[in-house]
Amino acid sequence: MDTHEFTELRKKEFDEFTEKYTQLKGDYSTSLTVAIANPSPESIQKVVDINTELTSLIRAIVQVLTKKGETANITQLTDDLIAYQTQYAEIQQTNDTLTTLKMIKHSSVEALAEANWMYSIYIGLLLILISIILYLLITSPGDVEYIGNSITSLIN
């Protein structure tokens, strides 16, 4: 197997993991919502089962990535693994499962809201910088030709 085939195989494996992981995270969130709305033993067990499947999947991919020496995604996956294991322990140890499920759902929603807030800030800053650049380009007399010549000389 040459390096190109190896790289393609590794990318395919990681893409399959990412697809399954994304699906399980969605199922986990949905199951949490269902268990909060209808706290039956079956719905709570489904949350626990999906949690267990998520942690197993993350452990497996972290082990593979560690063996291959790829550390780019390991930190985020390890953080996710710790979060899911903590949630599993909380569900198993609590007497008030409904409150624990609400707390887990709230922490997920809170993390999403924080990510959306940061995204909005970055988009706002980007728009401000683009506006400043456009303003400087429009108001600078004659410098546009100099900039064009400089870019042309860099290309050639």
Image (cartoon, rainbow, N blue to C red):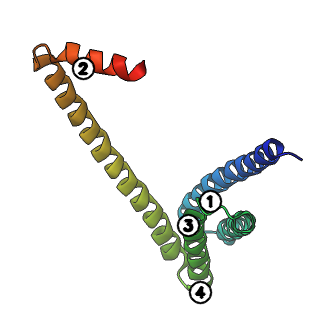
Q: Earlier in the sequence, mark 4 or mark 2?
A: 4
Pinpoint residue 86: horizontal percent, then vertical percent: 56, 78
Which three-letter amino acid code belongs to the residue tagged 2? Ile
- Observer-side mark, 3 or 1, equals 3
Screen quadrant of the C terminus: top left
Answer left or right for 4 relative to 62.
right
Q: Earlier in the sequence, mark 4 or mark 1?
A: 1
Cα separation, mark 4 vs mark 2, equals 66 Å
- Observer-side mark, 3 or 2, equals 2
Answer left or right for 19 relative to 147.
right
Cα separation, mark 3 vs mark 2, equals 43 Å
Residue at 21% of width from left, 35% of height from top? 128
Answer left or right for 154 relative to 149.
right
Q: Name the one closer to the observer, 62 or 55.
A: 62
Q: Which residue is mark 4?
A: 93
Q: Earlier in the sequence, mark 3 or mark 4?
A: 3
Q: Name the one closer to the observer, 66 or 100.
A: 66
- Observer-side mark, 3 or 4, equals 3
Question: Vertically, is 156 above or below 15?
Answer: above
Cα separation, mark 3 vs mark 1, equals 21 Å
Q: Residues within 10 Å of mark 3 (few under 14, many from 20)?
A: few
